[in-house]
Image (cartoon, coloured by chain):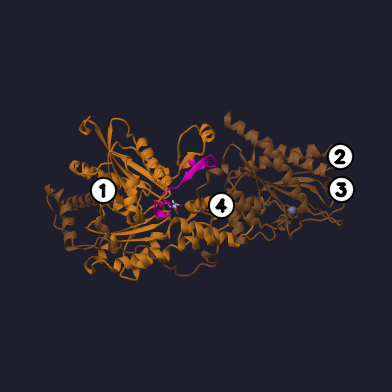
């Protein structure tokens, strides 16, 4: 059977440390937490009734699973066959959810953390072999920029869980000179917040999952929009604790490093275009949703002549939408050079 | 926006080129330093361009191995947070070893409390916790092996083994269940009885004190301890351990009551014992009697009574193991 006879499904995938999403040419969009788990033995398999579990479901059944979060810290772990398999299964799962099944020819663009692109792209390419009929790997900030048509004189700051990726778009395909990666990101805010709250309330019992939830609901930089009060068991009794100061400090731990890196990258832009880039700083990724963060970075730009920082409207799908746009724009002849 | 269209076409072309390079096992161009943008080439040149670029690069002899730029920039936050993050190890969401929750029980790890220069609790006439726990452990081992379980002991002689070492032995032996054997000492007139602990927080000051004394010299810092606890509260091992504790306690009480009608059933409790945290499998700590109670201490000196205790522990463990096996098969 020739491939020509099949319907083509184009997909863009954002393969994230904590969340992965897919946007398909059919209009389907899906998002899943980046967890993959296999039942540990036959008994576990009978209990969970599936050969493999993903996302929330995997997390909830973790006692019975060999659980993997394959892109911890933005990298696929070297030499871990299980992590490679997890990446592959996660991608297949997303593609299946988006309707890429029998009789469809799937052409996929996969956006990955910039750090994975840099350090383990060869490895990644091997790992994703076979998940689609044709596929391309791009760095996540590039996919975001492409999807927003922000290819000229812009800076993308993608604040994910494990890393924050910076990328200046200057009308060329981004090189290493145009990119930076920091480990100050969502997870580091969680760590800070956990440490700060625990230091002040050593008796309180809480987990990193709870901390992340508080952050996702109540994060802020600058003036608190409202007091941040959470309920934590203290000596077994649910107790209300005000963590406004801790939340502020933890979230603001991003501002210094992000501002410094932003200004450093800016200083390397051709002086002729610096002002335009300053006025086109775009925050993406889950961390872009922290209220007040864009304003704080804008203030930092004030030191060098002022500028504008805005957060994307749809942090969940902006990357996969961008990947889909690349997939649709790539000529058919090009896809033939990129077998899955 | 003709310019934008052109720009996009060029970007896609470069993305494709990089991926073709990748497929051919070549170092991608973006890993090298930026080069001036090539003029936009016609669509027909698509296939030719990547090969031509590499041919020329190699001809000139630019080693593609010129290492990638360091992109991870460690940036110090404006103010160093106090206390420093580095000083405390954080529990990360971690990959859980499947052997931790294996649903069928094959290997039981028995941990005789104390040993060597650490005698544990003692009576005035010289009966020490460390010798009772070892004796009961050896009897339990024989019973379990007779029932086709593999058994691993954390100590098999009168020597001191740090709690940390015990936990390591447990983990590395691939154990499915862990039982730590202790003898209580309750400093109250008529204080006595049996109780079984699983890992968890406690509100009870007496229990906290007991945990403190059993954790002494564990080799864990407070920070280790906190993060170990942290990793446990999120895991289901706690509920498995509670069930195991229930099974053990029930058997202990029903085996000892006939010979000690006044025996106090002190029940199943949770407490933060270090060995229970670090062993990474369903784990309980049984205080199989109280050496501070005259009657119980006298009994503990009898081999037949220690055998009775070992049999009760064996029954409790196998009750649990069989229940797990059954519920799995069902
Ligand atoms: N409303 C929010 N406020 C602050 N942080 C958020 C919010 N929503 C998500 N996050 C954080 O963003 C991070 C995930 O971002 P995402 O772009 O999905 O990461 P990745 O691409 O690394 O999977 C997590 O640390 C998450 O806690
Ligand atoms: Zn003891």
Per the image, the residue denoted by label 1 is B23
Residue under the image location 28 percent in, 51 percent down? A148
Q: Does the magenta stretch include residue A76?
A: yes
Count of residue discs: 4
A186 displayed left or right of B169? left
Q: In which quarter of the image is the C terminus of chain B?
A: top right
Tell me residue B53's x, y (percent).
17, 56
Mark 4 or 1, closer to the camera: 1
Point out the stretch of residues depicted in magenta. Answer: A58-78
Q: Distance between the residues labelled 2 and 4?
A: 44 Å
Decide if residue B103 is in sight here.
Answer: yes
Q: How far apart are marks 2 and 1 (CA)?
A: 78 Å
Report the chain holding disc 4: A
Mark 3 or 4, closer to the camera: 3
- Chain B tint as drawn: brown
> Quick one: SS at disc 4?
loop
Q: How far apart are marks 4 and 1 (CA)?
A: 43 Å
- Chain A tint as drawn: orange
Task: Determine crowd level at label 3: few under 14, some 14-19, many 20+ residues with C-alpha closer than 10 A.
Answer: few
Mark 4 CB within 8 Å of ligand 1: no
Report the chain holding disc 1: B
Tell me residue B187's x, y (percent).
83, 55
B169 displayed left or right of B28? right
Labels 3 and 4 positioned on one and the same chain: no
Q: Which of marks 2 and 1 is nearer the N terminus?
A: 1
Task: Determine crowd level at label 2: few under 14, some 14-19, many 20+ residues with C-alpha closer than 10 A.
Answer: few
Per the image, the residue denoted by label 3 is B298
């Amino acid at each position: 059977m020739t491939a020509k006879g099949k319907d083509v499904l184009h997909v863009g995938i954002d393969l994230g440390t904590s969340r992965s999403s897919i946007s398909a040419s059919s209009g389907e969009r899906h998002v899943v937490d980046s967890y993959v788990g296999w039942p540990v033995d036959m008994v576990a398999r009978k209990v969970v009734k599936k050969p493999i579990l993903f996302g929330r479901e995997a997390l909830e059944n973790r006692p019975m699973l060999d659980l993997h979060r394959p892109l911890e810290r933005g990298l696929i772990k070297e030499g871990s066959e299980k992590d490679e398999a997890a990446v592959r299964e996660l991608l297949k799962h997303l593609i299946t959810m988006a309707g890429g099944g029998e009789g469809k020819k799937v052409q996929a663009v996969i956006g990955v953390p910039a750090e994975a692109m840099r350090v383990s792209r060869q490895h990644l390419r091997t790992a994703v072999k076979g998940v689609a009929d044709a596929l391309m790997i791009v760095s996540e900030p590039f996919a975001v920029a492409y999807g927003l048509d922000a290819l000229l004189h812009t800076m993308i700051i993608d604040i994910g869980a494990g890393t924050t990726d910076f990328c200046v778009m200057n009308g060329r395909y981004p090189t290493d000179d145009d990119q930076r990666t920091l480990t100050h990101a969502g997870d580091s805010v969680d760590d800070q917040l956990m440490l700060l709250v625990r230091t002040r309330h050593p008796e309180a019992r809480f987990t990193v999952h709870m901390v992340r939830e508080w952050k996702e609901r109540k994060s802020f930089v600058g003036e608190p929009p409202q007091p941040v009060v959470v309920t934590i068991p203290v000596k077994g009794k649910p107790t209300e604790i005000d963590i406004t100061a801790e939340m502020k400090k933890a979230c603001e731990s991003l501002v210094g490093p992000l501002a410094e890196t932003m200004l450093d990258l800016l200083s390397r832009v051709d002086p002729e275009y610096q002002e335009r880039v300053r006025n086109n700083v775009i925050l993406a990724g889950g961390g872009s949703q922290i209220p007040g963060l864009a304003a704080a970075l804008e203030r930092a730009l004030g030191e060098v002549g002022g500028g504008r920082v805005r957060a994307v409207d749809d942090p969940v799908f902006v990357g996969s939408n961008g990947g889909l746009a690349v997939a649709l724009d790539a000529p058919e002849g090009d896809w033939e050079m990129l077998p899955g | 926006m003709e310019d934008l269209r052109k720009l996009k076409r060029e970007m896609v072309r470069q993305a494709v080129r990089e991926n073709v390079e990748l497929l051919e096992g070549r170092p991608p161009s973006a890993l090298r330093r930026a080069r001036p943008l090539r003029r936009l080439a016609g669509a027909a040149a698509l296939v030719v361009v990547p090969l031509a670029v590499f041919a020329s690069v190699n001809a000139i002899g630019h080693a593609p191995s010129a290492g990638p730029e360091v992109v991870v920039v460690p940036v110090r936050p404006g103010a160093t947070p106090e206390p420093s993050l580095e000083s405390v190890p954080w529990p990360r969401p971690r990959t859980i070893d499947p052997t931790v929750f294996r649903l069928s029980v094959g290997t039981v790890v028995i941990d005789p409390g104390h040993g060597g220069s650490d005698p544990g609790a003692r009576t005035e006439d010289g009966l020490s916790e460390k010798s009772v726990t070892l004796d009961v452990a050896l009897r339990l081992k024989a019973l379990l092996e007779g029932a086709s379980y593999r058994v691993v002991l954390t100590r098999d002689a009168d020597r001191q083994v740090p709690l940390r070492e015990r936990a390591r032995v447990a983990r590395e032996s691939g154990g499915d269940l862990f039982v730590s054997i202790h003898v209580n000492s309750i400093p109250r007139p008529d204080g006595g009885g049996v109780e079984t602990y699983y890992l968890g927080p406690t509100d009870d000051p007496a229990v906290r004190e007991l945990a403190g004394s059993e954790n002494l010299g564990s080799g864990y810092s407070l920070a280790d301890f906190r993060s170990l606890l942290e990793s446990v509260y999120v895991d289901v091992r706690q509920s498995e351990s509670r069930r195991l504790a229930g099974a053990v306690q029930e058997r202990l009480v029903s085996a000892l009551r006939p010979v000690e009608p006044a025996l106090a059933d002190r029940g199943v409790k949770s407490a933060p014992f270090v060995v229970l945290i670090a062993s990474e499998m369903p784990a309980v700590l049984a205080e199989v009697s109280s050496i501070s109670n005259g009657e119980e201490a006298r009994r503990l000196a009898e081999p037949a009574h220690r055998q009775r205790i070992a049999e009760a522990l064996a029954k409790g463990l196998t009750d649990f193991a069989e229940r797990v096996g059954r519920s799995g098969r069902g």
